[in-house]
Image (cartoon, grey):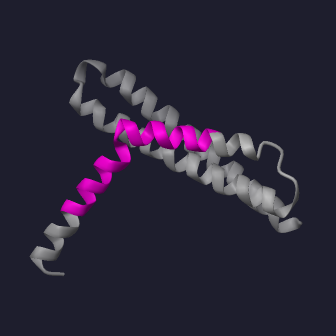
Amino acid sequence: MTTAEVAAASRWSCQRREDIASPQRVERDDKRTDTEYKRVEDPSGRDGWLRLAANRTASADLQDTLAEVYDELITVEPPLAEEHRASAEKYRRYTTSTRDYTELALKRAGEL
């Protein structure tokens, strides 16, 4: 990879991170995820379990992004570092739990 390609990839990565972590994007994704979740609260059949797994995957991705945002806030707002650190850990636990649930939903879908 050339230096120019590395620089271009770095700029793209930074822009992508800013887009992912923007408050508007997080709020929009949260509303979309909530709507999708309500649509498949009671999965029936293989398709329902697969939709639930897809929804939980999106939710885990959002939770992971929130953990990253709180990690960045630790250095940006030192007086609130402990609160941000606790929030980041909370969202990491949510992510782990949600991914475990996703695996169970996929396993259930495979059984049908």
The range drawn in magenta is 11-34
Say if 85 sits above or below 52 in the image. Answer: above
The prevailing secondary structure element of the residues shown in magenta is: helix
Say if 78 sits above or below 32 in the image. Answer: above
Q: Quadrant of residue 111?
A: bottom right
Residue at position x 32%, y 49% in the image: 19
> Total label count?
0
Residue at position x 79%, y 62% in the image: 47
Nearer to the camera, 90 or 4: 4
Q: Is residue 87 left or right of residue 19?
A: right
Residue 97 in percent (x, y) is at 64, 43
Residue 34 in percent (x, y) is at 62, 39
Kindly give the residue lying farthest to the left in the view shown. 3
Residue at position x 64%, y 41% in the image: 35
In the picture, the quarter occupied by the N terminus is bottom left
Say if 36 sits above or below 48 in the image. Answer: above
56 drawn magenta: no
Q: Quadrant of residue 3?
A: bottom left
Q: Inspect this view and state whether residue 63 appears.
A: no
Residue 2 in percent (x, y) is at 13, 80
Say if 8 sits above or below 95 in the image. Answer: below
